[in-house]
Amino acid sequence: MHSAAGQIFNRSELAFLMDRCIPGSVERRATSNPDAVAVIDGNHQITYAELEAAGTALARELEARGVGRDAVVALCLSRSAEQIIASLAIMKAGAAYLPLDPSHPRERLEFILSDAGVDVLVAGADFCALFVDKVRHCIVLTTNEPIAAHFAVSPSDLDARDLAYVIYTSGSTGRPKGVEITHASLMNLVDWHVAAFNVTDVDRASHLAQVGFDAAGWEVWPYLIAGATIVIGDPALMQEPEALRDWLCRNHITLCYASAPIAERLLQLAWPAPVALRILLTGADRLHTFPPATLPFEVVNNYGPTEATVVTTSGRVPAGCVGGFPSIGLPIRNARVYVVDSDGNRAAPGVEGELWLGGAGVARGYRNRPSLNAAVFGPDLFDATPGARIFRSGDRGRVLPSGELAFAGRIDQQLNVRGYRVEPAEIEQALNEHDAIVASAVIARDNDGHDTKLVAYFEAPAQPPALRELRTFLMRRLPAYMVPALFVPVARLPLSENGKVDRAALAALGTHDSLADEAYVAPRTPTETRIAAIVAPLLKLESVSVDDNLFVIGGHSLLGTQIIARIRDAFGVRIGLRFLFDSPTVAALAAEVDRTVVHPQERSAASAPAAASA
């Protein structure tokens, strides 16, 4: 950078130890404090001694199947204690773990197994049966059944330059791509995290991220290294901010990560005092709001792509500020960030440019993608350290007067949907596989500045397929967060002068002609009229049929909480978010409001057990 602030901006604060890896660090914790609780998974908990023994046992079984250094072992288990044990075991055997989300479509998982060159799969019985012909060895694990230790412990023979894990992200070529992360990069993240947030063995950290999301590892390894306790939460908690708040309080969680859209909802809630939570970590999307001055814990905003090992910059968000967006802070220890202009030169402070990321967190590269690696990874010309490399992130930003970074969005067409990085090309490729569609383009539309809605435009020379058919077709090929909210048939996709799809022209087309499953049914009662008037503006629609599925026409969990809150304000009744998920129509909501108003005692009695169980 060109200022004193810029010199501090890329300072590496501490020397980095290259001779440490996760397995050895966990083993030392198990030796020093074997009876401490490492993981709590519902009513099932394991100590550090049990974690170490189970991990070693599975590691020896993996070694017996030929697993060794720098091999990649796929792991297809839901978030659980066993999933953590298996990840540790794979690293103990010298290999890298490749987390696969069991909820993703089979076709996508098969592609990843093939693309990564996986020989060994660790999974539940059902998934092993599905993919037994895709790998050489399957090891079946069942959750909530602790892995027994059958083998003696031997020192792990690992090098910090070996791979620790591989994470597949949405691919710009229409296929997912695997990011290779070494132990050196992972340990830099872990050591920074433990020091930055003063993590000790009395802390209790939440584990809520999906297993295929790189933040899941961030929720695990720093805390095991520090001897803390990891508490695994139900995924449904992420759909109901109030339930998540109550769970955090009930389980005395001291550190929690939540993506920016979820964190923003948590900041709006009333919190009891005192509260065990001391730090709420957020990231994965732009944070739009500052925390209120009365919030009883700190909020820390983080930025970093998968290719830079989860977190590249981090900063505490000041409470009580108004206007603008919170910054993404400063580079973490041993990370470097450059704001670069279109000519590859460093931009002056305050001038927007592309973020080039360097330092210890830069990934080895994409698995089996030499041409893509050459395009986005390269030598760090701004750092004289031998072997220093950078990753061209495709993100835009600028340096603020404070020296902190402001995030300014994407340079390319990559989208961010509720914390997930999405390449439109992958969705378009899946759409184009439908027999009735000859071409498609996917864009994002901003929803009140707090959310991104995917809209698919497509050419179908004959009769366009029905909405339900299209969604079912894509759900077999893509994760749910990649399925567009709206589908708009067009005679021709608009093209720019160079023959590419003109996405700006697409955005100008609007979504008024989007597909709908059912004919429009106008509100029939006063309650339906009032609820339709609440729902339509939130979905940015002129009108909503009372029989429309609100999640099909663009709704999602965060909008769902707003719908529920506005119904409560309008009618003075409380409807659970789960009811909306089960019955997502204006007609059903109106009927529930009318029933609640007419039979309040009956409703209160019926809802009490559900509230207690939450």
Image (cartoon, rainbow, N blue to C red):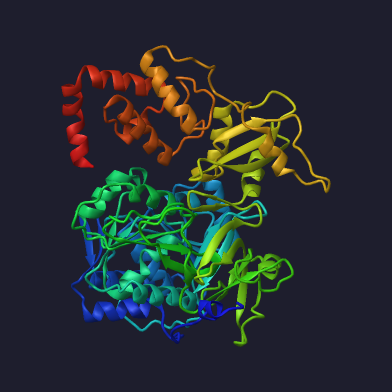
Q: Name the side, left or right, on which 180 lies relative to 145.
A: right
Quarter-of-image position of residue 115: bottom right
Which residue occupies the foreground of this view, 51 or 313? 313
- Give the answer, above or below, for where 402 lies relative to 248: below
Q: Is residue 90 above or below residue 595?
A: below
Q: Can residue 57 be seen in this view?
A: no
Where residue 231 sits: x, y (%)? Answer: 27, 59
Give the percent coordinates (x, y) of residue 528. 39, 18
Q: Residue furthest top?
A: 524
Residue at screen point 34% across, 51% down = 267
Residue located at (26% from left, 19% from top): 595
**Along the viewing direction, whichever of 462 and 131 lies nearer the viewer:** 462
Indicate the position of residue 37 as horizontal and vertical percent values: 21, 67
Q: Is residue 37 left or right of residue 533?
A: left
Q: Quadrant of the N terminus?
A: bottom right
Q: Would residue 514 appear left or right of 505 to someone viewing this image?
A: left
Q: Which quadrant of the figure has residue 392? A: bottom right
User: How many marks are shown on the rendered structure?
Assistant: 0
Q: Which residue is drawn at 67% across and 54% down?
A: 173
- Do we see residue 203 in this rendering? yes
The residue lying furthest to the right in this view is 497
x and y, in percent, of residue 161 in the image: 52, 80
Q: Quadrant of the C terminus?
A: top left
* The one of 316 and 213 positioned closer to us in this rendering: 316
Name the residue at 35% across, 66% down.
Answer: 220
